[in-house]
Image (cartoon, rainbow, N blue to C red):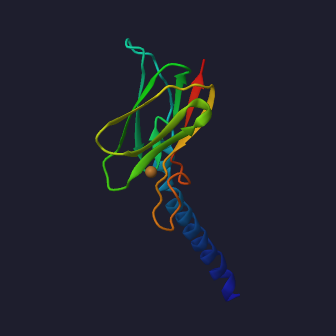
Amino acid sequence: MPEAGQGPGSGMAKLKGWLLGVLLFAGPSLPLSVAQAQDTYLATIAGDGVQRVRIEGGNYLFNPEHIVVKVGVPVELIVSKEPGLVPHSLIIWSPRAGIDVDVALDEREKTVSFTPRALGRITFYCREKLLFFASHKEKGMVGTLEVVE
Ligand SMILES: [Cu+2]
């Protein structure tokens, strides 16, 4: 039985190869899942009555990705993007809440202002997309602006 000696050995080699493949496949995705673990930012009202929130866009996420602001109180978003060649933008659109933000992000900070007029959760996102690749929004570059009382 010449095959009996060879069979298990090659089977094991295949298994090792498969495990290596799994590790190589899982490896690069680990830093991404850590980077995606952003937290909630609860805006506070400054002495001048404005809620200021800093948002940074990166590949492919916003930090913070969940922002909570008070209704009827002016908001100033101080927006920027991390250094790099990949363009990013920030779109927040809710006619109901009176919010229409459409800004190209730069490494230099920009300020956008609005006053949220209605309660609820508004999804914000990046509209960039390179050729036939998935849009940044599809890659997870989305966040939530939550307007509370
Ligand atoms: Cu983007």
**Nearer to the camera, 131 or 18:** 131
The quadrant the N terminus occupies is bottom right
Residue lying at 56% horizontally and 54% vertically, measured from the top left: 138
Q: Quadrant of residue 117?
A: top right
Q: Is residue 8 left or right of residue 99?
A: right
Q: Residue furthest right?
A: 1
Query: Where in the figure is residue 97, as x and y percent of width and height?
Result: 59, 30
Q: Position of residue 67 (x, y in %)?
A: 51, 30
Q: Quadrant of the C terminus?
A: top right
**Residue appearing at x 52%, y 57% in the figure:** 135
Residue 27, compared with residue 63, is above or below; it is below
Task: Pinpoint residue 31: horizontal percent, then vertical percent.
Answer: 45, 48
| Location of residue 46 with respect to 88 vertically, above or below | above
Depth check: 1 or 14 in front?
A: 14
Does residue 77 appear to the left or right of 123 in the view shown?
Answer: left
Question: Where is residue 61 shown, x and y percent of the image?
Answer: 47, 45
For the point 63% across and 25% down, the residue is 119
